[in-house]
Amino acid sequence: MEKRELKENSFSWRDRLRSVLREKMSEKQISILIAAAELFGEKGFSATTTKEIARRAGVAESSVFKQHKSKDALFAALLESVTTHIFLPMLRHGLDALFGREFDSLEDFFRALFRNRLELIRENVVLLRLLLLELPYRPDQRVFFLSAIRETKLFDALDGLKARGLLPDRPAEETMGILFACLGGFFLTRFVLFPEHFAEGLDEDTERFVLFLTKGLA
């Protein structure tokens, strides 16, 4: 992928969180939320202490409890900020332009979609780890996740491919389930579970994955 394409697809959750919260919170409070997101994403909620959060944020531990009564309250505030200000914009980032294009083949569509999401995940892997680790235990956030997906134009793009005969005539939800299971599994393995084993060969693996996904759906 060209450098200009990478720059246009750039999305930093830290920068966006600072921007949207600056009018409502002090820099210290924002730093606490960002430090909490990083540590929860790296270690998980249970393994993270407020002392570590304070150290990462560069503040006294008392500053954490001055704004939040407990670690649970801090996590609730963090999730609210992420889902309200970060998740949907991040999910939709770069997709409108992608779905506005017309592709000659299903393989071209999935290759473009894969590369579009790949750079986004690389830049925001900590935040995505946080969501992946916690979503299974938070039904309300899962509902939000599904509604956010529906607000993108992915369903329209799949319907367009189906109308052109590039996808079989099956319900969009079924195709979406297969697509997310495959993409999610690939990215989860690459960036969350075994990142140290996949430092090289990403381009080759991408092509193999796109071919597998295309043939399977078609």
Image (spheres, rainbow, N blue to C red):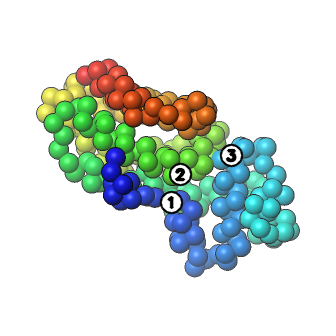
For badge 2, the amino acid type reads Asn
Asked if residue 207 is positioned above or below residue 75 in the image, the reply reads above
Residue 115: image x %, image y %? Answer: 37, 42
Secondary structure beneath dot 3 equals: helix
User: Label 3 belongs to which residue?
Assistant: 42
Sooner in the amino-acid sequence: mark 1 or mark 2: 1
Question: Label for residue 61?
Answer: none
Few, some or many residues within 10 Å of mark 3 (<14, 14–19, 20+): some
Q: Position of residue 137 (x, y in %)?
A: 65, 39
Which of 138/8 is in front?
A: 8
Q: Earlier in the sequence, mark 3 or mark 2?
A: 3
User: Can residue 6 be seen at all in this image of the molecule?
Assistant: yes
Return the x and y of residue 146 as percentages of the image width and height.
45, 43
Q: Residue at x 54, y 66 (%)?
A: 15
Q: Residue at coordinates 54% horizontally, 32% vertically from top-left?
A: 198
Judge from the rendering whether residue 144 lies leftward or rightward of residue 64; answer left or right. Answer: left
Q: Earlier in the sequence, mark 1 or mark 3?
A: 1
| Picture residue at 72% right of the left edge, 44% below the top | 43
CA separation in Å, label 3 and label 2: 12 Å
Q: For the residues marked 1 and 2, what is the alpha-carbon distance in whole angstroms?
A: 7 Å
Which residue position holds label 1? 12
Q: Amino acid at mark 1?
A: Ser
* Front in this rendered view, residue 147 or 214: 214
Q: Amino acid at mark 3?
A: Glu
Image quadrant in which you'd find residue 170: top left
Q: Mark 2 packing: few (<14 Cα in 10 Å), some, or many (20+)?
A: some
Labelled pair 1, 2 in contact (Cβ < 8 Å): yes
156 lies left or right of 91: left
Circle number at residue 124:
2
Specify whether residue 217 is in view: no
